[in-house]
Image (tube, rainbow, N blue to C red):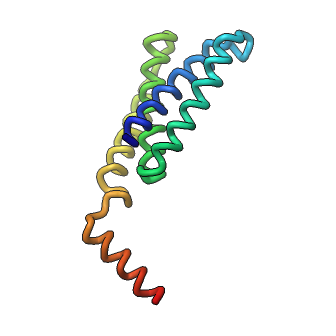
Amino acid sequence: MPYLFLAISIASELVGTSMLKASQGFTKIIPVIVMLISFICSFFFLSLSLKTIPLNAAYAIWSGIGVVATVLISVLIWKEKINTGSVIGITLIVIGVIVLNLLGPGHSSSEEAAETQQTSLSDRA
């Protein structure tokens, strides 16, 4: 369920960001209202996902997917141009998200986690 909340958060953030562009500098009221609602939903669902997913992993996923999807939206919907530097930067972000998810601190083995917890409890006694 936490990853569903994270996905809803990402989708809401993408809608909010698109509406930020559509608001044309806060001059169009409907996109501004949709943007505000979308960002509130995004942070609400992100907070729900953080009850289970470690902050570093959740934020890396949220921002990484958000960056890639925002670039795709900007190119496909808003007809903006993308250059080689953008592609390289986005690729590095994706690699970072993958590395963090595969090797990050939220992915230690259960034996290591139990040993760490046991050591912590022993130190308190």
- Across the whole image, how many numbered discs are drawn on residues? 0
Task: Using the image as rendered, state which of residue 58 and residue 49 is in the foreground.
Answer: 49
The answer to whether 19 is drawn above or below residue 121 in the figure is above
Q: Position of residue 93 (x, y in %)?
A: 41, 40
Which quadrant holds the N terminus? Answer: top left
Question: Which residue appears at 35% of the width and 79% of the height?
Answer: 118
Which image quadrant is residue 19 in? top right
Q: Is residue 85 visible?
A: no
Along the horizontal axis of the image, is 41 left or right of 25? left
Question: Which residue appears at 61% of the width and 18% of the height?
Answer: 34
The answer to whether 4 is drawn above or below residue 78 in the figure is below
Question: Which residue appears at 59% of the width and 29% of the height?
Answer: 39
Q: Residue furthest right?
A: 27
Q: Is residue 98 visible?
A: yes
Q: Position of residue 117 (x, y in %)?
A: 37, 75
The answer to whether 120 is drawn above or below residue 17 in the figure is below
Q: Position of residue 42 (x, y in %)?
A: 54, 32
Along the horizontal axis of the image, is 35 left or right of 90? right
The answer to whether 14 is drawn above or below residue 55 in the figure is above
